[in-house]
Amino acid sequence: MGSLQIDPAIDEESFDVVIIGAGMSGLYAARAYLAIQPSINLVVVESLASVGGVWSRERIYPGLNVQTAPEYFEFPEFRYKDMDPPAEYNGKGYMTGPSWSRYFEAWTEKVGLNKYIRLNTSVRQVTRHEDGIRWKCHIGDGQKVYITDKLIVAAGITSSPKYPDLDWSKFTKPVIHHRYFGERSKEWDNEDVKHVTVYGGGKGSMDNIVQLAKAGKKITWLIRKEGRGPVWILDGKLPNGKRAEALGFSRILALLMPSLYHDSGFSGLHYFFKRNFFGRWFSRFFMNTSKGIAMSQMKPLTDNVRRAVPELPPFWMYHVIGVNNYDVKIYDLFRDGTVEVVRDSMTSLEGNTVGLASGAKFETDAVVFATGWKANLSLFSDNLELEMNLGMPSTNYTDGYLQKWKALEDEADKRVFTENPILKDAPKPPRIPPQDSGPFRLYHYAVPTEFADRSIAFLGVAPSTGMSHFSMIMGLWTAAYLTGKLDLPSKEEMEKVAAFELRFTQIRHVGLSNEFPLITFDWMSVAAEFLKETGVNPYMKGGYFSEIFSAYTADDYTDLFDKWIAKHGIVGKPKGAD
Ligand SMILES: Cc1cc2nc3c(=O)[nH]c(=O)nc-3n(C[C@H](O)[C@H](O)[C@H](O)COP(=O)(O)OP(=O)(O)OC[C@H]3O[C@@H](n4cnc5c(N)ncnc54)[C@H](O)[C@@H]3O)c2cc1C
């Protein structure tokens, strides 16, 4: 991105709050903000032509399904049962992506957000206003600037495609990043394309493989040697036939496995499973035996299936795990010759030929790069100092910055291992893929410690397995923070916490270091901690055992904002408003 030439005739507009991104994180933040401070002048800026982010009309395609079980991926204000026409589910009971996209649009309308959203509007760069208090969002080609007191960046960590370092200008066949798999489907879904190469080992690659197989293509699944290898695709049902989310949306998993926060309501149980010898033994057993259970659905193993077996037990998260939300038997495709797994790195694309590091070559009719996303938000990258002060991933950190955070992170490691000693025994990752950027360094994955002036927050940089509920809670937390209704610790303490939160996610998820902080099986404890800080009691089930074992659904959050308002009252007009 080049520096912006500021035109004197530039068109400026002022807002109390600008939110970048109309995905789940951005729109729930808007919903929460307007609930607690209805008088604000707020705008949501979205570069696409529809809302939904990952689930927008542009990005979904037939065959992409939500992998979270339906009852755990809806919002309290609008329920699936009220959809008209009704929601569609695939043969395994997972909601289809197009259906969820339609649901999200209907939810947006129901909660009255449409009038706040400006579609087809991209923020190209964000700078600090000359007054040192507000922010400037430079829109599109820079002819328009939105000036705002408060800025929420919810631009999504899966918005910028990452491509492999290859030149494919002499390749004569289509090359499509999986971000555009739906939009560019005509390029692979035609009779000329008989064979497709899918490059990359994550859940997105499996989504593409299943669609390609359904369209009658032969597929080479090429997984590079220097990466994390193939992903686990776990069965979404428990042995008792219940959805896995029945555990994942209750507190039990955070108790049994390592967790960032040991929520006070259950600190005794956390202590037992984390620090007591027998509790730890059980926890380790639970974490490690998951591999056997996960592998059972891959059997019978052939040489080809063996090449698709992930390398470490799933709960250690060498890779972001996926859920088997497909209505085909995926590993049958690996046995019947539809999919061939090749563990090698792509080194060239010329004519119609793929060249590999081993020297092997093969012909293909199309290539899908399922190679993931750039972790950094390039909105600030013209100003290194600002980028570092905002805790953004960068390739240009100064030595001083790195030294300061190294000291904080070394100290944080001690806390991580003291509170979760099982992490000392975590399996060593066979290799960590090369990193081209640094991590996000934010307090509660949201607030830059150098800019804790209640003017800016980031949402969605730490995706969670309870994303729908987590978005509601983080939306409320952020609105409370930005309106000055949530206390923060000192800057020094925030830095310690930010380092601890970063290092926990890096150590806990043995293969993920810089991509983004991930909140996985302990997300209920994290959500409880953050919700408690807003003043809302996170324990809503009304009984000790039901709190541990029964899963949270949208029903539990129906009056989330009312509870907050009952405690703090509606926030008045912002300063300077009429
Ligand atoms: C294929 C796929 C499937 C997934 N399935 C699940 C699932 O089943 N369950 C689950 O919990 N999670 C799932 N996830 C994780 C997913 O990221 C979350 O569910 C959630 O949708 C993320 O919401 P978000 O608002 O944080 O980001 P996004 O949905 O990515 O929204 C960010 C928005 O910001 C906009 N934007 C970015 N930059 C700018 C800019 N400069 N100016 C203006 N607008 C901008 C983007 O266009 C986008 O609309 C999936 C992710 C992917 C990629």
Image (spheres, rainbow, N blue to C red):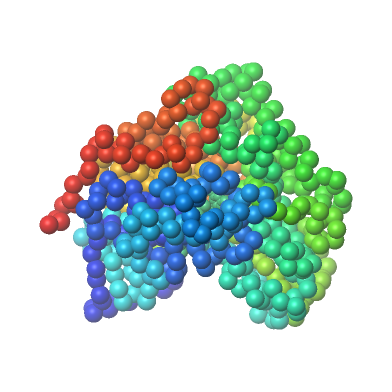
Which quarter of the image is occupied by the N terminus?
Answer: bottom left
Q: Residue 87 appears at what percent x and percent y? A: 54, 55
Say which residue appears at 85% left-offset and 55% top-offset: 335
Q: In this view, does 499 lie to the left or right of 88?
A: left
Which quarter of the image is occupied by the C terminus?
Answer: bottom left
Q: Is residue 305 left or right of residue 559?
A: right
**How many marks on residues?**
0
When the figure is inspected, residue 81 is found, relative to residue 361, above or below; the finding is: above
Between residues 9 and 323, which one lies in front from this camera angle? 323
Residue 79 visible to the viewer: yes
Q: Residue 82 appears at what percent x and percent y? A: 47, 51
Say which residue appears at 62% left-offset and 38% top-offset: 244
Q: In which quarter of the image is residue 7?
A: bottom left
When the figure is inspected, residue 455 is found, relative to residue 408, above or below; the finding is: below
Q: Quadrant of residue 425?
A: top right
Q: Quadrant of residue 14?
A: bottom left
Q: Is residue 322 left or right of residue 294?
A: left
Between residues 281 and 211, which one lies in front from this camera angle? 211
When the figure is inspected, residue 401 is found, relative to residue 359, above or below; the finding is: above
When the figure is inspected, residue 17 is found, relative to residue 382, above or below; the finding is: above
Say which residue appears at 46% left-offset and 56% top-offset: 104
Q: Residue 25 appears at what percent x and percent y? A: 43, 52
Q: In this view, does 126 lie to the left or right of 511?
A: left
Residue 125 visible to the viewer: no
Say which residue appears at 50% left-offset and 63% top-offset: 56
